[in-house]
Amino acid sequence: MFEAFQIPLNAGTRHCAVLGQPVKHSASPAMQNAGMAALGLDWRYLAFEVRPEDLRAAIEGAKAMRFIGLNLTVPHKVAAMELVDALDESATKWGAINTIRFEARDPQGRWQPLQYFSGALPDEVRSQGFNTDANAIVDALRDDLEMKVAGTRILLLGAGGAGRVAALRLAAELPTEMFLVNRTAEKAEGVAEEIRQRFPQVKTSTNFPEGKVDLLVNATSVGLKRGDGLPLDEGQFPLQRAAAVYDMIYRPAETTLLKVAKAAGCRTANGTGMLLHQGARALELWTGRTAPVEVMRDALVKNVYGD
Ligand code: ATR
């Protein structure tokens, strides 16, 4: 539908891209191109498979070609912290970058997004790193589970890259208690310690909770592969003790966890909302305009799940 309004590719077309490895299954091009077309922009969003050892060159190359911006996905989000010219507070706060915006100086010497420079190309351009992933979990919980995190008890499974950021961002909303559980216990302990330092009001432990929780979040990769079972042992924590279950996985649409949780009477949502909100915010950073969230959601759902 919205493709019909896209301005044909031409020499003035501006570009954004996602860099990752692997990147072939990324839904970001579908979602972002729909958003850009809906805003009437002569822009395109591409995807490039980039090896970690080539990340620096890829970012510099995009900068040299005056791309508007980049998204970064696995495995580049932490490494990029060392590779950009400037860090937004969101990147320093969460220790990872999923969005880069290229910027140049305006006549007053202030750094502005490159999209504002349409005529002669500016000589000096810098890359600024942002994190739009972290806030996306809060947006998705609000939209999809009508949930506010403040004052709740949360069980979070997983303490890898995604789990760490989710745990810290949720802690910033001041739940009463957080339980962090991970296959490799030391990693959960490391994240718990970080929360205790930064958000001492939140009671944080690394065991399964007694009694009920308001929210269980899966931030492990268990559920991604066909035939994957539950990311937790129901002997340790039966799912009917969770009021709501959020699985950060969006493909497949219904993991074993979500299926079992639904049958146990929990409210459930998958990770589509997180992908949507991090992308919508990235588009806003690049354009300075409100993202057409519903258009992006439709394109995303169509790309991931088909018609
Ligand atoms: P991401 O960037 O998606 O977070 P990651 O950093 O590799 O990826 O983290 C994957 C998470 O899934 C980790 O919490 C990992 O547990 P470990 O820290 O013990 O590796 C978890 N995970 C992966 N496979 C798992 C499995 N079979 N059982 C339990 N947890 C698993």
Image: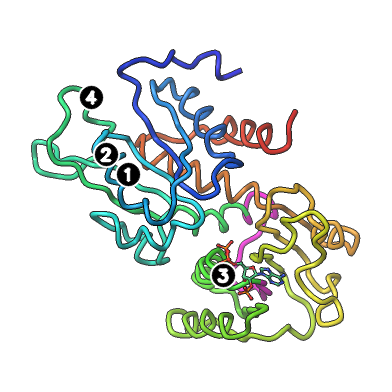
Callout 1 environment at 10 Å: few (<14), some (14 to 19), or many (20+)?
Answer: many
Which of the two discs, 3 and 2, labels the residue nearer the N terminus?
2
Would residue 260 be found to the left or right of residue 89 on screen? right
Q: Amino acid at mark 1?
A: Arg
* Tag 4 and tag 2, C-beta contact below 8 Å: no
- The disc label shown at residue 113, or none: 2
Q: CA distance from mark 4 to mark 1?
A: 16 Å
Which of the two discs, 1 and 3, labels the residue nearer the N terminus?
1
* Tag 1 and tag 2, C-beta contact below 8 Å: yes
Q: Is residue 212 magenta?
A: no
Q: CA distance from mark 4 to mark 3?
A: 41 Å
Q: CA distance from mark 1 to mark 2?
A: 7 Å
Question: Where is the C terminus found, in terms of image quarters?
Answer: top right
Measured from the top left, where is residue 34 in percent x and y? 53, 27
Which of the two discs, 4 and 2, labels the residue nearer the N terminus?
2
Say if disc 3 is inside 8 Å of ligand 1. yes
Instruction: Name the foreground residue: 10 vs 157.
Output: 10
Which of the two discs, 4 and 1, labels the residue nearer the N terminus?
1
Would residue 172 be found to the left or right of residue 108 on screen? right
- What span is in magenta? 141-157
| Among the 4 quarters of the image, the one containing residue 216 | bottom right
Callout 2 environment at 10 Å: few (<14), some (14 to 19), or many (20+)?
Answer: many
Numbered disc in front, either 1 or 2: 1
Q: Residue furthest right?
A: 263
Question: Where is the N terminus found, in terms of image quarters?
Answer: top right
- The residue indicated by pointer 3 is 160
Q: Amino acid at mark 3?
A: Gly
- The residue indicated by pointer 1 is 101
